[in-house]
Amino acid sequence: MEFLGAIEQLAPVRALRVSFYIYPLVNAAHIVAIGCLLTSVILMDLRILGFLVSQERRPFLKLMRRIGVGAFCAALITGLLLFSVRASEYVFNPAFQLKLLLIALAGLNLLGLRIFASEQDGMPKERSAGFFAAASMLLWLGVLVCGRFIGFL
């Protein structure tokens, strides 16, 4: 707990907390990053599930994966900044805890997709990847909902 309090007392974190402009901009950047991440994940999962067939499978999944990784990195950085402002509160917030659990499960789901449903070139097989794609959409939508609840619990 002292460690989290120390994070909150760092000069950049205190500046972020009291800034009239920077905190809302970081918050907005986090929302945009989450939006990009969810959009890329859902589009990728829909393509894996057999929708969006007018898009060539391999290039489309490769593009969505790149966008998703970039968006995840942006969401991670902005999320850490937002967390730092109230670290000692957020760590005990049930919605925050569930959000982290769902992110971890989404990562394990991605690993499962890569291990159990991949061809030689790393692109998912259509039939065996359906479970992972559906689970991915549910997990990431759960992350979104939990993120919205953090401020209300």
Image: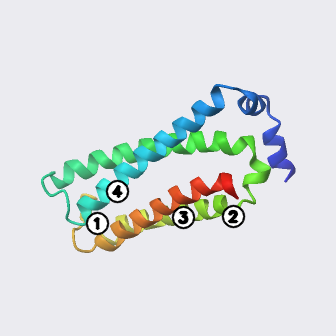
Label 2 vs 3, first from the N-terminus: 2
Label 1 vs 2, first from the N-terminus: 2
The alpha-carbon separation of the residues under discs 4 and 1 comes to: 19 Å
Please name the residue that numbered disc 4 is placed on. 42
Q: Is 35 situated left or right of 88 in this image?
A: left
Q: Residues within 10 Å of mark 3 (few under 14, many from 20)?
A: many
Vertical relation: 47 (above or below) 36 = below
Residue at the image position 53 percent from the left and 59 percent from the top: 145
Give the farthest residue toward the left. Answer: 54
Pair 4/1: label in front: 4
Residue 34: percent from left, percent from top = 48, 46
Vertical relation: 43 (above or below) 83 = below
Pair 1/2: label in front: 2
Please name the residue that numbered disc 2 is placed on. 94
Location of the N terminus by quadrant is: bottom right
Please name the residue that numbered disc 3 is placed on. 102
Please name the residue that numbered disc 1 is placed on. 118
Q: Inspect the image, locate mark 1, and give the three-letter code of the amino acid beneath it.
A: Ser
Residue 2: percent from left, percent from top = 87, 49
Residue at the image position 61 percent from the left and 33 percent from the top: 24
Of helix, strand and loop, which one carries label 2? helix
The alpha-carbon separation of the residues under discs 4 and 2 comes to: 25 Å
The alpha-carbon separation of the residues under discs 3 and 4 comes to: 16 Å
Q: Inspect the image, locate mark 3, and give the three-letter code of the amino acid beneath it.
A: Leu
The alpha-carbon separation of the residues under discs 1 and 3 comes to: 23 Å
Pair 2/3: label in front: 2
